[in-house]
Image (cartoon, rainbow, N blue to C red):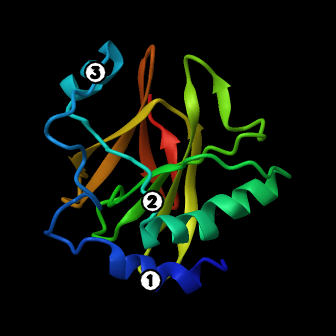
Amino acid sequence: MRLASVALALAMLAPLPGHAQFFFDPKPPDLEVEVGPDEIASKAAGFETIQTGDWPEEERTKMVHEHFVLPLAQEEGASQIGLTDYALIDVTGDGFADLVLFPRIVDSKKTFSGPSDGPRVLVYVFDGENWHRALDAYALEVGRRKVVLPDGTERYELALIHDKGFDRYVLDDKSFKRAN
């Protein structure tokens, strides 16, 4: 994938394993965050909500825009791109930062599926050398929780949170599949 050329640059900007899990401070301490019943249910199930944001002046944001959002817009024949929320965080448990992306491609039919499902969310997984698209779905928020597999390996599963609750997704080889 042509994204391999940016892999090293994004990986260098990502936090090291054992350091802060999020690229940026999740929110300033003086701001209130609205939490709905859907997010409360996912938290009760052990999921932490992945905090996403858009930082237009950050070099990382420009790279995410250029190497992920623009190609998506081109795939769909769209051209109007709004703010794009994202987070670089490990969602597979392999120690590499992956990309959770809420692309706001204004003139794309795929940006929103419906008010209850939320906007389009994509997860790109970085394997240490290359990026690949592992999930393309819709959600208001994305959560993750650590699970221990029968062989003792630690991985994450994702929760795609929408206004009617949440759906669990697990990594199956190279993509996330719905678990419930």
In the foreground, 9 or 33: 33
* Mark 2 or mark 3, whichever is nearer to me: 3
Instruction: Kindly identify which numbered label has been placed on residue 46.
Output: none
Q: Earlier in the sequence, mark 2 or mark 3?
A: 3
At x 51%, y 43%, the residue is 177
Give the labeled residue for mark 3.
35
At x 35%, y 18%, the residue is 38
* Mark 2 or mark 1, whichever is nearer to me: 1
126 sits to left or right of 18: right
From mark 2 to mark 1, how far is it between C-alphas?
13 Å
- In the figure, 34 relative to 134: above or below? above
- In the figure, 11 relative to 30: above or below? below
Give the labeled residue for mark 1.
9
Residue 34 placement (x, y as % from top left): 29, 22
SS class of the residue under badge 2?
strand
43 sits to left or right of 135: left
Q: Quadrant of residue 157?
A: top left
The amino acid type, in three-letter code, at marker 3 is: Val
- Which quarter of the rendering shows the C terminus? top left
Give the labeled residue for mark 2.
99
From mark 2 to mark 3, how far is it between C-alphas?
23 Å
Q: Report if the CB atoms under discs 1 and 3 are less than 8 Å apart.
A: no
- In the figure, 92 relative to 146: above or below? below
In the foreground, 6 or 47: 6
- The residue carrying pointer 3 sits among few (fewer than 14), some (14 to 19) or many (20 or more) residues within 10 Å by Cα, namely few
